[in-house]
Amino acid sequence: MSVLPNQPKTLATPGVRGRKRRAQIMDIAARLFEDRGYHETSMEAIADAVGVRKASLYYYFTSKDDLLVEIHQEMIDLILDKQRERVAAGELPPSQMLLAIMTDLISLMESHPGHLRIFFEHFRELPTEIQHEIAGKRNEYREMLITVLDDGREAGEFAVDDSFLTAMLILGMCNWTYQWFDPAGRVSAETLAKLFYRQSVEGFGTAALRAQLN
């Protein structure tokens, strides 16, 4: 039985149905990449899993590399857009902004299973110009986190000596969950993010902020 309905469309197809179909193909491809390996997964294997002929798959993605690029772009744009919206709204204090960032990162394991391993382990397979673009977006996201930490220090919430190193520690802690976190396990992504946040605040939060944990 086909995983997806076999209704031919083209890359230029407008509307919600075309976007949903592309998203479904990306999700299936990401799972195959994670299970079998990127280099070991062919376009034919992806087409079989989707339930379409390989020629039909090319209506949506011109190559396996095209899929890889789309997966990377989707992941980084998703978390960037969420944080940009929070910054523009200007409603959250730095401490809650930090919790939101940590929740975003870990929740990707629930919303996009398989995608994170591709994002972190197959960056070098991207075309050079796309590598530069993704690296720039990663740097932008890291700078957003550094700003949150700096703002927290100024607001009297964080006692952070080096915002860059602290940001790298937080990103490493959250990003590495793709290696071991099971979204179907005993804790949810939101619960795990709150645990990470609590441990972080107990490490570099001020006495006033730590008191709010009790």
Image (cartoon, rainbow, N blue to C red):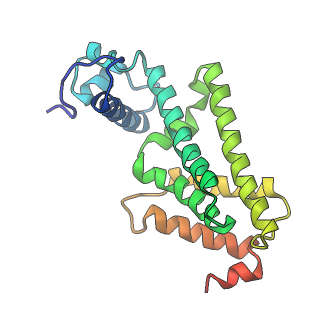
Please tell me which residue is depicted at 35% across the width and 29% down the height of the picture. 22
Name the spot of residue 151 as percent of width and height, x first.
76, 62
17, 165: nearer the viewer: 17
Q: Quadrant of residue 30?
A: top left
Please tell me which residue is depicted at 22% across the width and 22% down the height of the picture. 52
Say which quadrant the C terminus sits in. bottom right
Query: Quick check: 186 above or below 87?
Result: below
Please tell me which residue is depicted at 77% across the width and 77% down the height of the picture. 206
Name the spot of residue 126 as percent of width and height, x first.
58, 24
Name the spot of residue 10 as percent of width and height, x first.
31, 16
Q: Quadrant of residue 167?
A: bottom right
Say which quadrant the N terminus sits in. top left
Please tell me which residue is depicted at 59% across the width and 19% down the height of the picture. 127
How many numbered dots are placed on residues in this image? 0
Residue extending furthest toward the right: 161
109, 11: nearer the viewer: 11
Q: Is residue 88 left or right of residue 11?
A: right
Q: Is residue 211 left or right of residue 119?
A: right
Q: Is residue 108 left or right of residue 12?
A: right
Residue extending furthest toward the left: 1
Query: Quick check: 97 above or below 43?
Result: below
Q: Quadrant of residue 148?
A: bottom right
Query: Quick check: 89 above or below 208?
Result: above
Residue extending furthest toward the top: 55
